């Protein structure tokens, strides 16, 4: 089991591309905190990841109050934690954002075109969003920085996305929204992989743990068989390391002991099953490794603050059990 792919699947990563922007100097556009607009863009999601692809010209981008980053054609900037940020023609520019503007356009094909000014040689951006679950448990988000920048010059999915985004903005076609949404998910995965490859050798977090031989094998084992009746002894045997050494190393990278990580991961899987399926609570309890529905319900309520049936009702708008 590829633990990164498993996490991205279980937290329901979903992509969309909304805005095709041509902006002439001087210009500035601010995006508010993700929590303020996620419901209007992705109903039912609880975390928003904005990104911007520079398809022509140059501009600046960065977090509010932080030094701006110079960006040129082919660059991608991603804000994994959904922090408020600004894109502008010069560093330090501000413009109070209007959250009501950040909603899915009600008409026309996407990406939705926006022009800012009419001077020659405008900057050209494709701006989009990804959604995912942040709770009950998303170990990836805590391992990501506030801002990640990469370039299509690195090749791979990023370059393909930039080129397709540019082609769709010039000549939108039926189905373009779906294509760009799916490719933006692939682009994000490629961004994460490239960020992982850039981490220093002494970095210790969940992402770095994927490449650490013993921690990586432990994570793969837990994600491969989350319902197994795991013990630290069984996991250490699979990994080939003593119990004490594995517990210490796993906690150093992941931030919690292996069995606690497993318990939290089971809750994320259960939340996903409750939201996206029709299995009974009892069936889901067994699916994630609990011998009784009552024990599972107690653990789930402790983790998320709501009983499984209430969680399902709140997320799906019905009261399945």
Image (tube, helix red, strand yellow):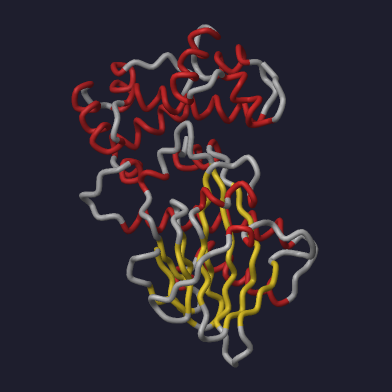
Q: 19 and 93: which one is in front?
A: 93
Q: Is residue 202 left or right of residue 51?
A: left
* Residue visible at 58% across and 49% down in the picture: 38
Q: 241 and 83: which one is in front?
A: 83
Q: Is residue 225 visible?
A: no
Q: Is residue 74 above or below residue 26?
A: above
* Residue visible at 43% across and 71% down in the picture: 61
Q: Is residue 274 left or right of residue 194?
A: right
* Residue visible at 74% across and 75% down in the picture: 171
Q: Is residue 133 visible?
A: yes
Residue 14 placed where, x, y %?
A: 60, 48
| Image mark count | 0
Q: Is residue 195 left or right of residue 131?
A: left
Quarter holding residue 93: bottom left
Residue 81 placed where, x, y %?
A: 44, 51
Residue 134 placed where, x, y %?
A: 48, 39
Q: Is residue 203 above or below residue 154?
A: above
Q: Is residue 291 above or below residue 84?
A: above
Q: Quadrant of the C terminus?
A: top right
Residue 298 placed where, x, y %?
A: 48, 13
Q: 247 and 131: which one is in front?
A: 131
- Single out the residue that lies furthest toward the bottom: 120
Quarter holding residue 115: bottom right
């Amino acid at each position: 089991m590829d633990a990164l792919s498993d996490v991205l699947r279980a937290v329901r990563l979903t992509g969309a591309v909304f805005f095709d922007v041509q902006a002439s100097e001087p210009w500035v556009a601010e995006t508010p905190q993700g929590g303020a607009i996620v419901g209007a863009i992705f109903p039912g999601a609880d975390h928003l990841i904005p990104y911007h692809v520079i398809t022509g010209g140059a501009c600046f981008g960065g977090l509010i109050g932080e030094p701006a980053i110079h960006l040129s054609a082919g660059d991608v900037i991603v804000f994994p934690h959904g922090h408020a940020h600004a894109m502008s023609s010069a560093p330090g520019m501000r413009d109070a954002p209007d959250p009501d503007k950040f909603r899915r356009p009600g008409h026309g094909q996407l990406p939705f075109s926006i022009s800012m000014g009419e001077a020659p040689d405008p900057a050209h951006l494709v701006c989009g969003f990804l959604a995912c679950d942040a709770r009950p448990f998303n170990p990836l988000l805590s391992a990501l920085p506030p801002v990640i920048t990469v370039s299509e010059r690195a090749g791979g999915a990023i370059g393909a996305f930039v080129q397709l985004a540019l082609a769709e903005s010039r000549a939108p076609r039926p189905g373009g929204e779906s294509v760009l949404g799916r490719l933006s998910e692939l682009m994000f995965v490629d961004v994460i992989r490239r960020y992982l490859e850039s981490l220093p050798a002494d970095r210790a977090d969940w992402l770095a743990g994927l490449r650490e031989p013993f921690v990586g094998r432990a994570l793969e084992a837990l994600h491969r068989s989350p319902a197994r009746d795991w013990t630290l002894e069984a996991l250490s045997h699979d990994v080939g390391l003593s119990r004490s050494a594995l517990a210490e190393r796993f906690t150093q990278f992941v931030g919690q002991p292996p069995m606690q990580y497993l318990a939290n991961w089971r809750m994320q899987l259960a939340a996903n099953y409750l939201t996206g399926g029709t299995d009974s609570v009892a069936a889901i309890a067994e699916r994630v490794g609990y011998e009784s529905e009552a024990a599972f319900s107690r653990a789930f309520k402790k983790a998320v603050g709501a009983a499984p049936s209430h969680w399902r009702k709140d997320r799906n708008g019905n009261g399945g059990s």
